[in-house]
Amino acid sequence: MTIDLRPWRRLLAVWLPAVVLCVVTAGAYVWQTSESGGRRSQIRKQIEELEQEITQLERMQQETESDREAVEEIDRQFDLLYNDVFGNLDQRLTRILRAVGTATREAGILPSSYSYTAANDDETGFIRFGIRFSVDAEYMQIRRMLASLQSSPEFLVVENLNLSGDEDPVSRELGISVSISTFLAEADAGQLRRLTVGISRAAETTDG
């Protein structure tokens, strides 16, 4: 049986472009839907890149939240130091004197000759407030007093211990001058003058 292809040849210009278009379209479809290339591969790559960016953003968000929490904790600690630990003279003077009184009382000694000092501390920006007093006590009593002062909830620093007299050979007591300091966030200037100057003048007048 012989197939006459002459009609197909005559109409070649009509059907050949259509066949080529179909083949190209089919090839493009296969390429676009293939796993290794085409649109699907591009979309998958974009998805992977977006997922990586999301992961990085989530990590950055976690780090930012951690940093913010750390800053908030530091702010809380500064507020605690400023308001509760250092505070102002009105809030703390009674507590400081109570802490000194408790320390000396627990050690079984009686302080005398209280004096106060106050000066701005350039390094911290706070007011350095000092208390000085004298005690006559044995060595172990001094140790108990210092331990109590250092364990006090008040922020107290024992700056100096000076031997103010000879040891009593009978009672083995020492005359000790004790200097303690703390820091104040705020203090009324008039109150400081009354404490540091007024009391000193009163003591001088009494002695005179």
Image (tube, rainbow, N blue to C red):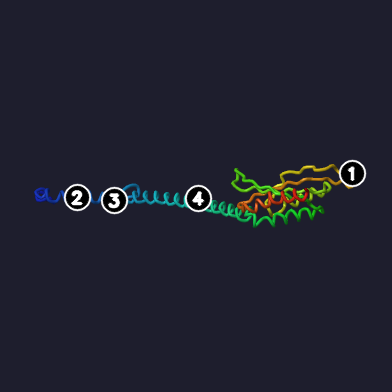
The amino acid marked with disc number 4 is Glu
The amino acid marked with disc number 2 is Leu
Which quadrant would residue 122 be assigned to in this image?
top right
Q: Which mark is residue 169?
A: 1
First in sequence, mark 1 or 3: give its number.
3
Q: CA distance from mark 2 to mark 1?
A: 122 Å
First in sequence, mark 2 or 3: give its number.
2
Q: Which mark is residue 104?
A: none
Q: Which mark is residue 63?
A: 4
First in sequence, mark 4 or 2: give its number.
2
Tell us which disc is closer to us: 2 or 1: 1
Task: State the image coordinates of residue 107 (x, y, percent, origin top left).
Answer: 80, 53
Residue drawn at x 51%, y 52% as measured from the top left: 68
Residues marked 2 and 3 touching at CB (< 8 Å): no
Task: State the image coordinates of residue 180 (x, y, percent, origin top left).
Answer: 71, 48
Give whichever of 140, 110 is nearer the camera. Answer: 110
The residue where tag 2 is placed is 21
Tag 1's secondary structure? loop
Tag 3's secondary structure? helix
The amino acid marked with disc number 3 is Val
* Mark 4 residue crowding within 10 angstroms, few (<14) / some (14–19) / many (20+): few
Q: CA distance from mark 4 to mark 1?
A: 67 Å
